[in-house]
Amino acid sequence: MKVFTTKRTLVTYLSAFKSANKKIGFVATMGALHRGHLSLIKQSKQQTDLTVCSIFVNPTQFNDPADLEKYPRPIEQDKLLLESAACDMLFLPAVDEMYVQGESWHIDLGDLDRIWEGAHRPGHYQGVTQIVKKLFDIIKPDFAFFGQKDFQQCMVIQRMVDKLNMPILLKIGDTLREPDGLAMSSRNVRLSAQGHHHALILSKVLFMVQHEFEQGLAVGALKNKALEMLNHAEGVELEYFAICDTATLNEVKADQRPDGPLVAIVAAWVEGVRLIDNVLL
Ligand code: PAF
């Protein structure tokens, strides 16, 4: 695997592949890689000629400095994992390679910037789109692979791609889970065994909702049941749970049963770690 730390060397190297009309796949990450990331690398390997992964803990998307500081950075282990997944290239820039001081950015993301993750993490999606735009501009991938676990992030990036007419096809990979159901996340390493156990309620509730929705239970009743379980769960501080339209992320009203696909989303804190998860209904 080739490792690049500067934009210039990466762009020079990629230009030969572009001239040869090779398809480039891109997996953007903040490191602390897990099987979810590796499955995106695998999909890219299957669908493109060259797979580039980036590892960059992006400061502009952290609205909490403590969260940025505590973000895991096991870079040597990440490199080994990428090698084992036969990733072709790793882009590993330092902060000053990606940002100049005092840079500002704003893209109109509409409601997506104001609801759910947008509301609870002000400025988060501005930071995400800012770095993803920069990475897309450098790598110019044909396909970019993101995980469904960050459902709203996938929508936000799709909106940016549409708004800016970027010739990039987004591919969304399924959420990978631990055998006990916990959605894989780089933040899970910060949970103790007990915290991990407490966090299981998130996926348990989502699977319950998925099952009962299929049985025909109304959205309002489902939400009440989910809230009851989440609010009484030990060691879990709920931020939100909602059942939403997948196209807009607007919450479905209690008595509605729309035809379109729905998504149940949840965010909660366990041992000071913020966890999110979702399932499609
Ligand atoms: O999902 C993530 O890990 C990050 O938000 C991303 C897309 C790599 C941007 O920093």
Image: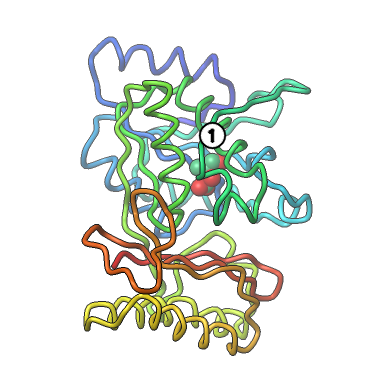
Q: Give 162 or 80, whichever is nearer the viewer.
A: 162
Does the image show residue 154? Answer: yes
| Residue positioned 64% across, 51% down in the render | 73
Q: Give 34 or 131, whichever is nearer the viewer.
A: 131
Total residue callouts = 1
Q: Is residue 83 left or right of residue 135?
A: left
Does the image show residue 29? Answer: no
Q: Is residue 72 left or right of residue 25?
A: right
| Residue positioned 32% across, 58% down in the render | 174
Q: Give 185 or 115, whichever is nearer the viewer.
A: 115
| On-image quarter of the N terminus | top left
| Residue positioned 39% across, 49% down in the render | 248
Q: Give 213 or 268, whichever is nearer the viewer.
A: 213
Residue lying at the far front in this picture: please name it. Answer: 255
198 w.r.t. 265: above or below: below
257 w.r.t. 80: above or below: below
Q: Position of residue 187 (x, y in %)?
A: 59, 62
Q: Secondary structure at mark 1?
A: helix
Amino acid type of the residue tagged 1 in the rendering: Thr
Ligand 1 is within 8 Å of the C-beta of the residue at disc 1? no
Q: Position of residue 116 (x, y in %)?
A: 55, 56
Q: How is the image coloured?
A: rainbow
Badge 1: few (under 14), some or many (20 or more) residues near its Cα, within 10 Å? many
Q: Position of residue 235 (x, y in %)?
A: 65, 84
251 w.r.t. 19: above or below: below
Q: Position of residue 134 (x, y in %)?
A: 53, 25
| Residue positioned 54% across, 34% down in the render | 129
| On-image quarter of the C terminus | bottom left
Provide the residue designation for mark 1.
Answer: 129
